[in-house]
Amino acid sequence: MWIALFCLSGLGLVASLGLGLAAKRFAVEVDPRVEEVERVLPGVNDGGCGYPSCSQFARAVVEGKAPVNGCVAGGEDTALALAEVMGVEAVIGEKRVAVVLCKGGREESKTKFTYRGVENCKAAVLVSGGDKACPYGCLGLGTCKRVCPFDAVVISEDGLAVIDTQRCTGCGICVKECPKGIIQLVPIGKRVSILCQSGEKGSEVRKKCDVGCIACETCVRVCPFDAIFMEGNLAVLDHERCQVCGLCIPRCPTHTIEARDGPFPPVEIMADKCSGCGICSMICPVSAIEGDKKEVHRVLEGRCVGCLLCIDRCPKDAIGIEVPINSAVELASR
Amino acid sequence: MKRLYLFQGGIHPSEQKFSQNSPIEELKAPDRVVVPLSQHIGAPCQATVAPGDRVRKGDRVGQATGFVSVNVHASISGMIRGVGLFPHPLGRPLPAVEIESDGEDAWTDNLKPHEDYMDLPPEALTEIIRDMGIVGMGGAAFPTHVKLSPPKEKPIDTLIINGAECEPYLTADHRLMLEEAENIIEGARIAMRILGVDRGVIAIESNKPDAIDKMKGLIEDIPELEVLALKVRYPQGAEKQLIKTILNREVPFSGGLPMDVGAIVQNVGTLSAIYKAVRFAAPLIERITTVTGSGVRQPKNLRVRIGTPTKALIEACGGFSSEVGKVIMGGPMMGVSQYSLEVPVVKGTSGIVVQPFSEVEEGSAQPCIRCGSCVRACPARLMPTVLGVFAQLDMFEEAQRYDVMDCIECGCCNYVCPAKIPLVQLLRYAKAEILTRRKAA
């Protein structure tokens, strides 16, 4: 028994000595800040920052090669925390989210043939461009859902990819992966999008889809900010210029334009503040406000589209809206 | 009889050669053709005509761009109606020239026939082949002049004349060998002159005994040519497999070409087109297409103008016999299903196979049970089961290491899979992704 005891403890001693020496001799110096930065990062390795993994991004931040606000997935909180670790000030940009620019689900759009194959949009486009008649239509086989590291994509019952803006971090992976190229990143506050990418002629679009842009140019004429322009046969919205008034939404004959997170609430006029100057009824683009001079004005129910143009122009600050809770973010940016 | 080797794998589906005894029928020139500018592998052509121009049969309407590209020609005489995007057998609209017939069907007078074609230098012959728009007519439509111009460091010793026609249903090459055998042999002699080889092997599967006899009778006085009867096996007509069968040589993996092992394979239809181009200066404006399947009333072999809409071919065969399920352009194994009958016949359209609705497979894929049937069937000696999983999981680097790029998309794995897994689509997806990534890098 003693021999065994000695042998084993001797072996243990030798091994521990070796390990101890190795730890001293081959120790790798790590900047402690790298670990700290890594702890702050979400750790999902989504690649939105341009680095293959979170730890590589952390190293780049510490070496000063990447900006502290480079982590798209982490957003504002992560940027602030990173700035604190690094002792610098973070510049926060507006958060962006992905939007699928197609509204033509299985109900609204036509198909060319019955597709029976691999459940992956990228494999499906190899078969005659996919089964949808419209070459720009969302195939709904969920390639974006598969690649999203944040589970922010759901495939609707109608066979369309829909982005959950609460979960989306704007990392942009789906934008790159979509074989149809119909996913776009937009600032989260810019709620209005034209949900069609078809550059085909209006008559062609009508044959293939009930909700596609037919290039009637109504929205271009309606927009008070010149934020919509025509690119060939497609109306395109310039999000820089868009003031999210929503005037274009009810005017689109094919209902292609939509606002995320519900409709726009109508404005209200506070009777105690209104002086009856009439400015609001003059500028209202949909004639939704009426009233006599020097009398309290009122908003016509069902007319107001919630464009909020009147709010800024009212000299008495008498116009406001009831703010739904989940729209607080959007309003702040308006 | 000479000993034949066999490539590994392959399958023997039911042959279904309904139309093998119907002689080639000439399909009347259509009132309107749509001639795609991209009918070959390689760079698409540049249109040389504009709407309103008048063209005659054989006039060039598309100019080749780059070395791997060939011209396209008007297949009827008439007026150019439009140059733009038109339906294409590949499934998406591609640039094409639309010609409306003037009913005269007159040839252009720019043709320069060569009676003494065997005295022309090889370079001149290759030039003619390129100008006349000759591509591989077995289906892949690879520009023939490229195949006939191997680099000097790769000596060629054998020309294989491919009359295997291993795809089920198709009989276009079979009928051509019976009715235009002389043209094929002359074409083979031209190709051999260009390549400077003195051995040509005519390979025909043994289910075409009449074609074998006919060819044998014609080559009695030509010592350089021989005829080989091959055991019926799909995909024997694929280049690499044919070389293995006849010469027992293996084309190397990872992008090897037949010329690496000293062989060039040319389809019988291509050789007949070469002869017509060189002897009569006739551009490639028509081809033999088999219209078949139990979905059409009378399966036939038709001589059709390039650009004829599929609809016209099906009408010429008595129309659909029952509710149509699938219209496949090419053979049933490697062809592409079409969703529109407006799609025109192109240089590579060897057949149109119509399956009635009742014959189309129903049901979806089941999980892989690892039976290994696909591995046994793969003639390229790959492991489709593993590659399929890699494709499903987007593991493209691994797929590449397992040689997915050597897949010839013959469809054997799909055919034998008891779980009905769409293996060819998965492998094509992996190949396409690897290519886009290579381009991006």
Image (cartoon, coloured by chain):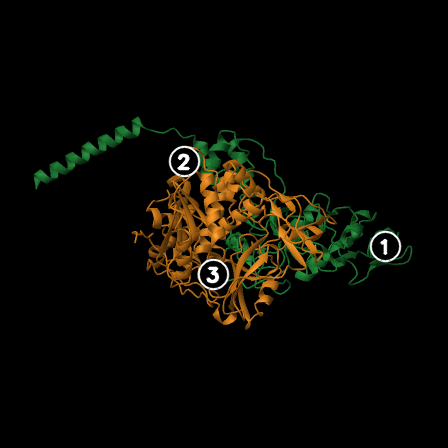
Chain orange in the figure, letter:
B
* As drawn, A134 above or below B405: below
Of residues B336 and B70, the one nearer the viewer is: B70
* Amino acid carrying mark 2 in the image: Lys
Instruction: Give the Cα distance between marks 1 and 3.
Output: 79 Å
Q: Mark 3, chain letter? A: B
Image side of residue A323 versus residue A297, left or right: left
Query: Counting other residues with Cα less than 10 Å from the Cα at mark 2, is it few (<14), some (14-19), or many (20 or more)?
Result: few
**Quadrant that contains the N terminus of chain B:** bottom left
* As drawn, B158 above or below B410: above
Chain green in the figure, letter:
A
Residue matched to label 1:
A281
Residue matched to label 2:
B154
Q: Mark 3 and 2 residues: CB-CB less than 8 Å, in contact?
A: no
* Amino acid carrying mark 1 in the image: Ser
Q: Residue at x 81, y 62 (%)?
A: A300
